[in-house]
Image: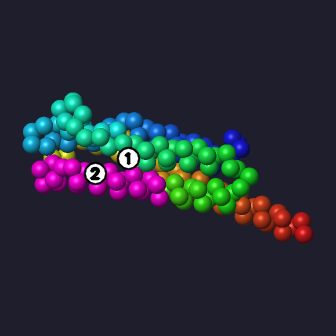
Amino acid sequence: MLQRIQTLFLLLAAAAMLVASVTPLAVFIYNSDEVLFEAMGIYLNGTLNDVTWGLFVIGMIGTVVALITVFLYKKRMLQIRLSIFNIVIMVGFYLYFGFILYKIYPVEHLQFQKVGIGAIMPVIAIILTALAIRNIGADEALVRSLQRLRR
């Protein structure tokens, strides 16, 4: 289980989603006020302005699904399906992030200041999960070829 490279990829993807859930996603300037966007809330000049727990929950679901997938090493096809589902969750993280940003603050009044580490981590997690899917598929192909030789 732990000696397989896809396990490392999935553990790193889980860590990346955890980091995305607890670190700042972006910093904006809105009407000369600093807006800090985190997965748990939007802070206007250091005070909590809006709660965005849904984004935090999506990030935690992505973390938990990646960790569960690690322990299903005997069921490779289920691992592949859960990994694809996890990629969909990570894309949903970005879609919900954009929806919240567009819904709460009009885009024409926002001035982008900097990207936080949390906004980059889901992309890294998607890449790591895709690499894990590729290696799980290679393991499945190897097992099937060996079963064919046994018959």
Q: Which residue is mark 2?
A: 100
Mark 1 vs mark 2: which is more N-terminal? 1
Q: Which residues are magenta?
A: 88-110
Q: Which residue is mark 1?
A: 54
- Determine if residue 140 is in view: yes
Q: Is residue 150 left or right of residue 80?
A: right
Outermost residue, left direction? 31
**From the viewer's perspective, is residue 56 above or below residue 137?**
above
Residue drawn at the location 50% of the way across and 39% of the way down: 15
Residue 49: x and y, percent? 22, 37
**From the viewer's perspective, is residue 142 above or below residue 1?**
below
Viewer-nearest residue: 19 or 78: 78
Dots 1, 2 in contact, CB < 8 A: yes
Viewer-nearest residue: 52 or 135: 52
Residue drawn at the location 41% of the way across and 56% of the way down: 92
- Determine if residue 9 is in view: no
Q: Main secondary structure of the magenta part?
A: helix
Q: Label 1 amino acid?
A: Gly
Q: Residues within 10 Å of mark 1 (few under 14, many from 20)?
A: some
Residue 128: x and y, percent? 52, 50
- Counting every numbered tag in the picture gives 2
Position of the C terminus by quadrant:
bottom right
Residue 21: x and y, percent? 41, 40
- Asked if residue 61 lies in the magenta stretch, the reply is no
Q: Label 2 amino acid?
A: Ile
Outermost residue, right direction? 151
Colour mapping used in the image: rainbow
